[in-house]
Amino acid sequence: MARMRTRAARKTTAKGAKIISGLISNTRFFRTGKGGGNWVNKAVKSTAQKATRSRWRARVGNALNNDYKGTFFKQHPKLKGKVVVHHAVEQQVLRRYPGRFSAAEMHSLQNLRGIPKGQVNSRVHLSQIRKEWNQFYKDYPNATRQQILDHATRIDLKLGTNFNPPVP
């Protein structure tokens, strides 16, 4: 008797995908918990939080080495295995805009973000952020250092509550 191959069960439902899509576009939500954590409504209500968000700027520092994952997890050891390390000013900038940033600045802790593994990583890191940077590269073929940092700031403020630890 021939064996029949069956399709693996889908990890998400259409309803779940719709909810996640809505949550990502609304930065007041973020995911908590290990693995299958819950989505939580986190409204920015206090004037102190609003003031912090209005002053937030993406920035870079100077890393001692190019091991950006080691740098991130040394500061946030409890997140190891739970997040994917993302560069706010992404590594492609080194190639696309030579001389604007050094490798030490690129891999500094100030430029690193943690994005929870799973659907948040797929939807935020591999899709939303990718689209934002692709559009930036089209619009600014000769971007300045400040324009690049300003774009990273816009992405942080738009999607930062999905990061772990969250960006203000």
Image (cartoon, grey):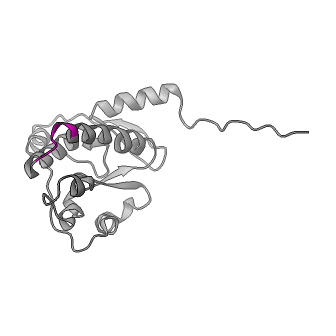
- Location of residue 10 (image quadrant): top right
Membership of 142 in magenta stretch: yes
Give the quadrant of the N terminus: top right
* 109 versus 23 height, above or below: below
Q: Main secondary structure of the magenta part?
A: loop
Instruction: Give the camera-side residue of 145 and 139.
Output: 139
Name the one closer to the observer, 145 or 6: 145
Locate residue 34 relative to residue 63 in the image: left or right: right
Give percent across and percent down for residue 36.
Answer: 49, 44
Residue drawn at 21 percent across, 38 percent down: 138
Q: Is residue 157 magenta?
A: no
Quarter of the image for the C terminus: give it. Answer: top left
Residue depicted at 28% across the width and 70% down the height: 66
Image mark count: 0
Q: Residue at x 32, y 51 (%)?
A: 164
Q: Position of residue 132 (x, y in %)?
A: 26, 38
**Residue at (80%, 37%) from the top-left corner?**
4
Nearer the observer, 77 or 3: 3
The magenta-colored residue range is: 138-143
Q: Is residue 65 above or below residue 15?
A: below
Q: Position of residue 56 (x, y in %)?
A: 12, 46
Vertical comparison of 162 with 81: above or below: above
Q: In the image as oriented, which residue stretches furthest toward the bottom?
A: 64
Q: Position of residue 7 (x, y in %)?
A: 68, 36
